[in-house]
Image: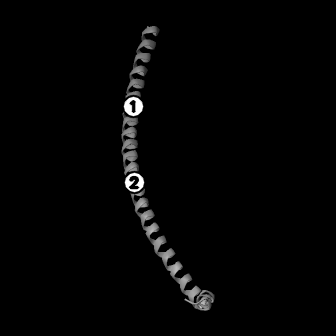
Amino acid sequence: MDYTVANEIATSQAVWAILCILLAAYFIREMKKENQVHREDSRKRENALIEHLHRSNESQEKTAETLEQIQLSLRSLEKRMDRVEQNMYVQRRS
């Protein structure tokens, strides 16, 4: 191949335009592949977070139920203590 022909091809704007278009198409295709991988990873993360959220909600519900039971027990104890104190007060006055 003659040097002048190769030089003309290398300096041709059409060749550089085609190369830029091919490079851009390759870059876009690779970015789409990468985005798809990131989307799959994001879905997995989101599913794991949702599962964790459900477990946390269940745990909080159990904690709330337990606290309610403790509160009821404390009320019952307070009532008993009030009765005991009243009985002691009545006995002391007698």
Local secondary structure at mark 2: helix
State the image quarter where residue 42 is shown.
bottom left
State the image quarter where residue 73 is shown.
top left
- Give the quadrant of the N terminus: bottom right
Nearer to me, 12 or 92: 12
Q: CA distance from mark 2 to mark 1?
A: 30 Å
Q: Position of residue 23 (x, y in %)?
A: 53, 78
Q: Is residue 7 left or right of residue 68?
A: right
Nearer to me, 75 or 3: 3
Nearer to me, 81 or 49: 49
Q: Position of residue 44 (x, y in %)?
A: 39, 57
Q: Is residue 27 left or right of residue 8?
A: left
Residue receiving disc 2 = 50
Local secondary structure at mark 1: helix
Q: Is residue 86 above or below residue 40?
A: above
Q: Residue at x 41, y 28 (%)?
A: 74
Residue 20 - label? none
Q: Position of residue 26 (x, y in %)?
A: 49, 76
Q: Label 2 is placed on what type of residue? A: Ile
Q: Residue at x 46, y 8 (%)?
A: 92
Nearer to me, 65 or 92: 65
- Give the quadrant of the C terminus: top left
Q: Label 1 is placed on what type of residue? A: Ile
Residue receiving disc 1 = 70
- Report crowding for label 2: few under 14, some 14 to 19, many 20 or more residues within 10 A (C-alpha): few
State the image quarter where residue 5 is shown.
bottom right
Q: Residue at x 38, y 42 (%)?
A: 59
